[in-house]
Amino acid sequence: MVDTPMPESSGKAPDSVLLTARGLAKAYSAGMAGRLEILRQVDLELRPAETLAVVGASGIGKSTLLHILGTLDRPDSGTMLFRGRDIFRFSSLELARFRNAHIGFVFQFHHLLPEFSAVENAMMPLIIQGQSRRAARGAAAAILERVGLSQRLNHRVTDLSGGEQQRVALARALIRRPGLLLADEPTGNLDNRNSERVHALLMELNREFGMTLVVVTHNMDLAALMARRITIVDGRLIELA
């Protein structure tokens, strides 16, 4: 089973490292130009409750890196350990179950289901897991209350503001208390006021839930809140001051 613990692969304390990536490489076909290398021998280590911003110009591979860290895409080569487990050895089904249990996602475009209410959207990961609708709804109501939407539970997402929709997406991402939250331009479509609210909420939830937070962003105010900042140059990670 995917959730069965495996021995740690390093000599460090069991919970001292959440994710270790070694030698990740990814390339795409560029037609007549051949193959375009996006990531080259990328190494990255993330610790529990750590915060990291990935910054830089469009097209350098930020989202590609995030998709691999989130197991939405597989690297061409390299390994990635999550709490000691070599997760790219999993089958596609095992990987989907792992992702649903351990990784949360927030994107620039929230990808909510417009025909459903806020609480129905937030409870979706628990329904997929197999929980009862009653239990899932209770958990969804609780996390929506935490993100300030207790009065909007039964509103269809099309009746919510952009900032409220992004908070529903954040609640959905966090309902299973994932160890890793990945956010790709989470405030890219929001005005300054709503962006600041989401920034503050991300940092509060990082501290409260002890989740590791990785954010791809062009917003340097958000990047400045992260403990670490990196960029990608010629397919390789560069740590910024």
Image (cartoon, rainbow, N blue to C red):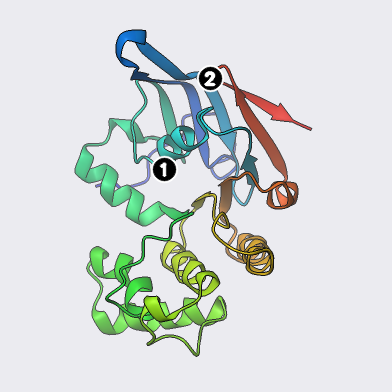
For the point 48% across and 76% down, which residue is it? Answer: 143
Q: Which residue is mark 1?
A: 70
The answer to which image quadrant residue 238 occupies is top right
Residue 47, horizontal then vertical, whole percent: 60, 42
Residue 60, horizontal then vertical, whole percent: 54, 27
Q: Which mark is residue 235?
A: 2
| Secondary structure type for disc 1 | loop
Q: Amino acid at mark 2?
A: Gly
- Indicate whether 181 appears above or below 54: below
Query: Quick check: 115 left or right of 65?
Result: left
Q: Nearer the viewer, mark 2 or mark 1?
A: 2
The answer to which image quadrant residue 228 occupies is top right
Query: Quick check: 233 left or right of 99?
Result: right
Q: Nearer the viewer, residue 91 or 157?
A: 157
- Indicate whether 49 appears above or below 143: above
Residue 219, horizontal then vertical, whole percent: 67, 48
Is residue 3 something one can see in this rendering? no
For the point 41% across and 39% down, which residue is it? Answer: 67
Q: Nearer the viewer, residue 38 or 125?
A: 38
- Indicate whether 137 appears above or below 239: below
Q: Nearer the viewer, residue 226 or 188?
A: 188
Q: Amino acid at mark 1?
A: Gly
Crowding at mark 1 (Cα within 10 Å: few <14, some 14-19, many 20+): some
Is residue 181 something one can see in this rendering? yes
Query: Quick check: 204 left or right of 140?
Result: right
| Secondary structure type for disc 2 | loop
Residue 95, horizontal then vertical, whole percent: 28, 43
